[in-house]
Image: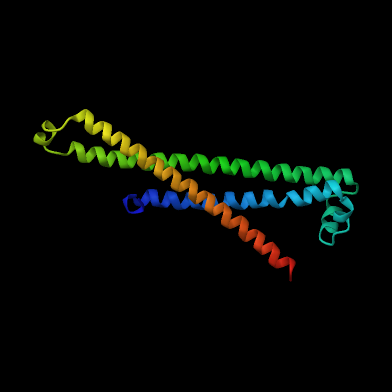
Amino acid sequence: VWQHLSHYRRVLFLVLLAFMVAGAVAEMISIATVLPFISAITNPELIFSHRYATPILRVLHIETSAQLVLLFTGAFCLAAVGAGLIRLAVIWLEERLAFRIGSDFGKDAYSKVLNKSYLEHCNQNSSEIISVLTGKLTLATDFVRHVMLLTRSVVILVVVIAGLLFKIGRAHV
């Protein structure tokens, strides 16, 4: 499929890949906010005594556990909504690009059919040609959509696992 894409569509796919990575990072951040959120609810003193959190809490004037829970609830909600919005944007871009690629394939296929000689057109059933092309183009577009879905899933998996391995590696240092 890649070799049949125009240069412009290849560039769009690479831009989409960058958005997929940004979405994966947002997913990782939203996952990473779960544990501090739970800690703020169950054991706020652990956060108040944390050496990196204490200066930040002072700057933000967070002094009570209720304020701490509110802060972490807001951060968790913001991260989850942000990741969701980015995911929606990536899905929208994926669908748009997949159908544009399918449209390009259709244009090329119908152009080849229309550029045949008059005698070839007379010897073929045009409704059969249209039916076959429509079915094949639907399959090609679905294939592109599924490849993009698989790519997005692999990117999210790799980024989240890399983030976890990075965190585990830092925990042992």
Looking at the picture, how far across and down is residue 7, in whole percent? Answer: 35, 52
Looking at the picture, how far across and down is residue 81, in whole percent? Answer: 66, 41
Q: Is residue 89 left or right of residue 80?
A: left
Locate residue 143: give its quadrant: top left
Is 19 in front, or is 161? 161
Is 136 in front, or is 119? 136
The residue sitting at the left extreme is: 119
At 44% from the left and 39% from the top, the residue drawn is 96
Would you place residue 18 above or below residue 87 in this image?
A: below
Locate residue 82: give its quadrant: top right
Looking at the picture, how far across and down is residue 71, in whole percent? Answer: 80, 45
At 22% from the left and 28% from the top, the residue drawn is 127
Locate residue 104: give its quadrant: top left
At 88% from the left and 43% from the top, the residue drawn is 66
Instruction: Name the colouring of the figure.
Output: rainbow
Q: Is residue 94 left or right of residue 38?
A: left
The residue sitting at the top extreme is: 127
Q: Is residue 92 left or right of residue 125?
A: right
At 11% from the left and 36% from the top, the residue drawn is 120
Q: Is residue 75 left or right of residue 8?
A: right
Looking at the picture, how far across and down is residue 144, in whole percent? Answer: 41, 45
Is 171 in front, or is 70? 171
Instruction: Report the number of discs.
Output: 0
The C terminus appears in which quarter of the rendering?
A: bottom right
